[in-house]
Amino acid sequence: MNLKNIFALPSATFFAIVLSSAAFGAGQGSLNSTSTGSSDLSLTINDSVMITGLNDVTFPAYGAANTGDIAQGDAFCVYRNGQNGYNITATNPNGSEFSITSAATGDTVQYTLALDESADASSANTVAYDTAISFTSGSDEVDCGDETSSVNTAFEIRIAEQEIRDATSGTYIGTLQLVLAPE
Amino acid sequence: MLSLNREQLSCISSRLSTGIDTGLATACGVKSTLTTSVPRQLLGILLLSSTLSFGESVNAATGNVVTVESLTSFNFGTWNDSGDLTASQLSCITSENTGNGRQYSYWVKVDSRDTIGAFALYRNGNPASPASSTVAISFKHRDTVHGSSVVTLLPGDYESDSHLGANAGCSVDGANSELTIEISASELASKSPGYYEGNFELTGMGGVNANQNDSTIFSVAITIEGASQQVKISRLDDVSFGAYGGTGARQSSERFCVYSSAASYRLSVSSPSQDSSGNFYLPSVNSTANIPVAVSFIDNIGGPGSIPVSNSPVSGLGDSNSEDCLGTDNATLTFDMDEQSLRSAASGDYLETFTIMIEPE
């Protein structure tokens, strides 16, 4: 069985930082032995997030010799300006549940998804479908250059043995979409 | 008929006998109209007959003495558009015959030791200074004990008014001679800045026959501070960075006008959030977060700033002709924020006032 998850990065997940163009009224100097003027600088930084470093996930073929659940995951980078909080909402753009589908038969195999605010998924928690899950802090570097291996978040896809046993032979493909939003 | 009193005759006698005739009439209290019309020989004849009629020798007195107490030099310090200047000094001038204890009249004069016919201070004490570096001053004198009027002294001439001299050491009535120096503000204002000094001599003449004198030398000094150089900064605007597209650093330059009557100026920038090392920041309105801002300066508008600005001032030339630079900016401050600092910053508004001070240099 060859499972493939393709993750789409919504363009809206990266918000622009907008610098204000508002004027405040600069101060002009007067003619004297010293002269002092002033200029106000203003800047507005809007919420910014970006998810990068995602890779496709491929499960090895599962056959008669295999037993038990299977799990695969990936670590990726979440940038959040100011290292502030964010949330991730996971969905399947081709369906209404976490699943992969056989192109030949149309059969589906459901899976569970866990997310972890660490790169090793050691404390990943299963998340509900299409539900925003909050996290405390993203990296303040867009490429997570300040993180080990430039990743700071991970997901894990787990398929139960019985789901696999129920499925007809073939290749199953699906897309997991992670929507990152500032909090 | 010419009328001369005893003192005038004594005075004339003394000065003629010693060959001194400069200011003779004034010095001896003779009306100038008469003096100038009377030949010197006639004065001598008149003097002789008058002297004989008194029947005593003008040089016979013992202890016939005039003393002029030393003066402290006048130092007006630094003048900076501070108006007219006046300084007076009280001293003791005696004129007496110590033999009989009688006091006699005295006259004073002031001479410049630097030049003839003028009371002046010279830049760096150089009498060869041009008019722009020569400050005219005036001297006035009065006797404070006997309540005489104030007399304006002419260079090298004894005053026309005589005063009764004091006894030795002015021990009876105290110091009696008040010498006043006046310098007008307009005179000072028209001169080149610098240190000015003049050297003078105060001479007192008197004694029994008005043939005694004594003198003291003193100096007068003042520093004229340069007319206040003026500067002006104008045409400043607030800095707007525009929309940030999500990548890259941000840079914005503010061009403005600096007028300076001096050859150059110093520019310094400060802001409330500036740290002790001179670094600038754009602080958050709602939190303690801030974004580093690099400030740089260039003395033209040809490009972004190239001279980093921190705690130390930077220099520019400025426009010395037009306060508003004729509508054309001549200086630039550039504000830079690097990409990572922008990305690291928490969401929100950031605002800071940068104060730019210009000083003549």
Image (cartoon, helix red, strand yellow):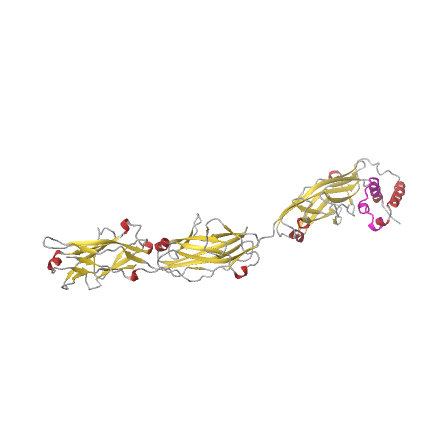
Can residue B30 be seen here? The reply is yes
Please give left or right for residue B37 compared with residue B341 in the image: right
Q: Percent from the top left, x then y, of residue A29?
A: 52, 58
On whether residue B28 falls in the magenta region, the answer is yes
In the drawing, does residue A131 fall left or right of residue A81? left
Residue B50 or residue B235, whichever sits in front = B235
Compare residues A12 and B301 and report the one nearer the observer.
B301
B349 on left or right of A132? right
Kindly indicate the quadrant of the structure image that contains residue B15.
top right
Image spot of residue A83 (x, y percent): 32, 54
Indicate the position of residue B49 as horizontal and vertical percent values: 90, 42
Residue drawn at (66%, 53%), measured in percent from left and top?
B186
Tell me: residue B5, above or below residue A105. Answer: above
Q: Residue furthest left?
A: A64
Quarter occupied by residue B109: top right
Q: Nearer the viewer, residue A17 or B354?
A: A17
Q: What stretch of residues is rendered in magenta?
A: B9-35
Residue B316 rendering spot, x and y as whole percentages: 52, 52
| Whether residue B171 is visible | no
Number of marks in the rendered image: 0
Task: Please check the rendered image and state whether residue B47 is part of the magenta-colored stretch, yes or no.
Answer: no
Of B61 and A170, the residue lying toward us: A170
Name which residue lies at 84% across and 49% down: B36
Q: Magenta residues: mostly which secondary structure?
A: helix
